Amino acid sequence: MPSHDRKSTPMWSVIRPLALLCCAVAVPALVGWAVDRLLRRAIGARPASRTLPLLRRCRMPLQAAVAAAWLYAALPAARLRGALYPDVRHVLLLLVLGTSGWLGVRVTGALVTTAVGRFESAVEDHSRIRRIRTQVGLIRRVTQAAIVLVAIASMLMTFPAARTVGTSLLASAGVIGVVAGIAAQPTLGNLFAGLQIAFGDMVRIGDVVVVDGQRGEVEEITLTYLVLATWDQRRIVMPVSYFTGRPFENWSRKDPRMTGTVLLHLDHAAPVDELRAELKRYLDGNALWDRQGWSLLVTDTTPSTVVVRALVTARDSDDIWTLRCAVREHLLGYVRDRHPRALPRVVTAVADGKAADGAQWRPLDATVPAPRPAGYRGVSLAKKPR
C-alpha cells in the first residue's frame, strides 16, 4: 500500500489527534521542568532573592498557555474534518488568549512585589517604604485590571457578532462615553480619588488615622475603597473619595512619634514637686518612653481640687497609649500609698437639727400634716358659678 494511502486510513486519523494530545501534555511539562530547573539553579546561587520564588508561582499559567498555544498551532496537522473543526479552533484560540492574560497578571504581580521588596531592603525610612508600597500596589492593580480587560476584549472580538457591535460602539463612542460617565460618576470619582491618594501622599498603607472618631491603621488601599483596621480588630471599609473631600487625622504621615497627657485631680495639699520627681524616676525605668520629652505641671484649679497634667512622649500611637495608662496607674498608686491626704476629698458637715430661722426640723410624715404659714386660706377646687 502506498504511503499516502496508508496515512489516509482510519487508523492514522485516530493516531494524529492522540499524538497531538500527548505532545500537548509533554511539551508544557518539559517547558515547566526546564523553567523549574533554571529557577532552582538561580535560587541556589542567590538564596535570598525574592524574585525567583515569586516567578515559580507563574509555572501553572505558563504551562497552560504553552499547552493552548501548542494545540492551536498543531491543530491543522491533525487533519480534522467536519463541522466541529472551526468550533474547536475557536475554543483553542479563546484558551490561548485567556491563559496569556492569566500569565500576564501573575508575572506583573511577581515583578511588582519584587521591586517593592528590593526597595524595602535598600531604604530604612519607613515613611518612604509605606509611600512606595501604596503607590506600587495601586499601579499593580491598574496594570492587572488593564491586562484582564484587554484579554476579555480580545476574546470577545473573536466572535463576528461582537466585532459588529464593537464597530457600532466605536461609531457612537462620544454619546456612550457621556452616558457612561454620568451613570458611573461615583465609581469614576473613587477611581480618581484612589490615584490622588496614592500619588498625592495623603495616606499610605500602615498609617494610623482617625476618621469620624474611629482610630485605626490603614490596612489596604484599592482604587475604590480603603480598609481601616481598628484596635478592637474590626475592619472599616470606606470609599477613598471620603479622604479627598473631608478632613481626617494622620498620626504617622511624617513622624509616628506622639505626645500624650495624663490628668490627675488631686487635693490642694498634693506634693507636686515630689510627684514630678517620681514621674521622672518612673520614666527612666520604662522602655516605652522615647526620652524625648516629659513634664508635670498644675494646669488648673477648682475650689476643691487641682488639675495636675503629666506629659510624656513615645515612639508611636500604640506605645503612647500604653505609656499613658501605666503612668496614670503608677501616679495614682503612689499618691494613695504615700500621700493619701492628697486625694480629692468632699467636705461634709453634720446637721444640728435646726433650720436657719431656729425652727426645729422633723422628717416628713404622711400622717402628720405639715404646718401651714399664717394667713393661709387654702385653695378651693370648686368651680365658681358663671
Image: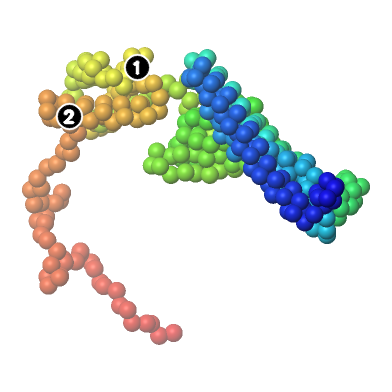
- In the rendered image, residue 188, in percent from the top left (x then y), is placed at 71, 42
Q: Quadrant of the C terminus?
A: bottom left
Marks 1 and 2, how far apart in space?
23 Å
184 sits left or right of 266 in the view: right
Residue type at numbered disc 2:
Gly
Which color scheme did the rendering employ for the protein?
Answer: rainbow
Q: Is residue 120 visible?
A: no
Q: Could you tell me which secondary element the residue under label 1 belongs to?
A: strand
Mark 1, residue position:
290
- In the rendered image, residue 69, in percent from the top left (x then y), is placed at 73, 40
27 sits left or right of 178 in the view: left
* Residue 164 circle label: none
- In the rendered image, residue 227, in percent from the top left (x then y), is placed at 52, 40
Which is nearer the eye, 106 or 354? Answer: 106
Up-down: is 5 above or below 248? Answer: below
Q: Residue furthest right?
A: 171
Q: Quick check: marks 1 and 2 in contact, CB under 8 Å?
A: no
Which is nearer the eye, 87 or 358? Answer: 87
Residue at 45 percent across and 37 percent down: it is 215
Residue at 12 percent across and 25 percent down: it is 338
* Residue 333 circle label: 2
Residue at 16 percent across and 26 percent down: it is 334
